[in-house]
Image (cartoon, coloured by chain):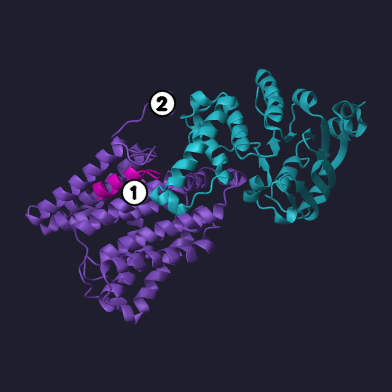
Amino acid sequence: MSVLKVSNLSRAFGGIKAVTDVSLNVEEGEIIGLIGPNGAGKTTFFNLLTGIYTPTEGEIEYDLNSKVTSKDFKPHKMTGFGVARTFQNIRLFQNMTVLENVLIGFHNGMNYSVASSFFRLPSFYKEEEETHDKALKLLEKFNLIDKKDAFARNLAYGDQRRLEIARALAANPKLLLLDEPAAGMNPKETAELTELIKWIRKTFDLTIILIEHDMSLVMNICERLFVFDYGHLIASGLPDEIQKNERVIKAYLGEDAN
Amino acid sequence: MKGFNKKSIIAIAALIAAYIIGQVLISNGIIDSYIQLNMIIIGINIILAVSLNLITGFTGQFTLGHAAFMAIGAYVSAIFTAKLGQPFIVAIIAAGIAAAVAGIIIGIPTLRLKGDYLAIATLGFGEIVRILALNIDYIGGAIGFNDIPQYTNWTWLFVITVITVLLISNFIKSYHGRACISIRENEIAAEAMGINTTYYKVLAFAIGAFFAGIAGALYANYFYFIKPDSFGFMKSIDILVIVVFGGMGSITGSIVGAIVLSVISSFLQSIPDLRMVIYAVILFLIMVYKPTGLMGKSEFKIFKKGVKGNVSSKG
């Protein structure tokens, strides 16, 4: 079953076309890699998928919790649709604790009223307690439980990356978008991340799309790859096929490379 | 985190004791009217600072129009008590609601602005309210509003200040409050995590305005007389100074800030020539040596939580 269908998607900024006529399909449970040189439009594509930009042309359709198209996208509605993401430059809530960061991820799952929070009605205690338990369990799975009261800004870089993924998972997504999860990591951390992503897919039963430059990670875990160059989708297929694809080699190495 | 445990019982007992001591000292005349005046000012400043802290310190929306909400509350309360002869409690609630409605009306268009732009827009709003008050004859115009009955006393002040602090800190410790803080920390990430940032900004604005309106009501019904110029730009700055001085994002900081600055400025009244100079030097020193304010973002706790595994205390 296809969970994401992108048809003829374009996005222009003035005269610059950051994404041009992209069409693709993502099936349930896949791990998809988006690769391409810098400035190829990968992050713009992510921003289109999460409602930060609206498409100039074309349409995005999710079939996760229910069928929704890009006309209804708003950044804050995406977690409700079953889509959560992380960012290329880590965007944690720096002055909040690790636990609070994850609690924010559960925001959509909570619904006691403002009045209930003012007057500490029973629903406040009930929901807060449940959510705290869930958050602690999640932190335990991510090996961050010891640091739950530390401020996010004081975490080591690798921990910050993991916390951001944990926060995204707290929103209970069916599709997880990871924007360069291995950026700035050393080979050992990248290897750990590879295992983590595999484990996440298995444990949380979701579809993952990731942007990544680290080929060891991409070739290792992605079942299918999409290659972007100058806003165009120039190739798609299995990792082995992509490695031999001439247009991809040209995009990365230039015209005359042989 | 259950409702009534040992700590909250002790806290309630301490509050009741503080109230009774205050009441006894006032009725025995040990606290004279001058000290009582300063206590009223401190209470009003605490309400104003805590409510502005919710908007500026916790939600991260820098506004310069907080005195305007106070003005709306003060005038509404004055109309209800002096012109319509309503009881004080009705006037207080009406003042809060009027200010909150104003907060929503001004918040929806301006809260899409960020940083400096929002500050300028709210500054403009503050001036609009002041100029309107100057030009409406029904509420006295430039002459001011006279003969407001004096209802505000120690009891009203104490109860309302405690309720304000309690409700706002309850709000902040809920998921709604966390949503507000996350907007301050990183608006894009907050939105990506499913937080409707516009809704929460307007909500924080409305709640802050509500309590500022109530502070205005207490003010109007203590001083018999209000005039538009009492709620100008400088009053907004005064409130902001308390918040920054105490620590943006700290409720106890705002309380301490309101008490310390009110006491300092009342002591300095004996040397009027140097008053503002010394006041400014104190602010200057605080900003140089403790730029996050007296309390930073942390809260003063009488009952220390277990520090086990708390790495943040070192940071």
Q: Which residue is mark 1?
A: B166
Front: mark 2 or 1: 1
Secondary element type, mark 2? loop
- Name the amino acid type tagged 1: Leu
- Residue B290 spot, x, y in % from top left: 35, 38
**Do the residues marked 2 and 1 share a common chain?**
yes
- Residue B183 spot, x, y in % from top left: 52, 47
What label does residue B90 carry, if any?
none
Q: Quadrant of the C terminus of chain A?
A: top right
Predominant SS along the magenta part: helix
Q: Nearer the viewer, residue B7 or B69?
A: B7
Q: Which chain is purple?
A: B
- Residue B217 spot, x, y in % from top left: 30, 65
User: In the picture shown, does residue A8 fall above or below B14?
Assistant: below
Secondary element type, mark 1? helix
Is the C-beta separation of discs 2 and 1 under 8 Å? no
- Name the amino acid type tagged 2: Lys
Q: Which residue is mark 2?
A: B314
Q: CA distance from mark 2 to mark 1?
A: 29 Å
Q: Left of A171 or right of it: where is B273?
A: left
Chain letter of mark 2 equals B
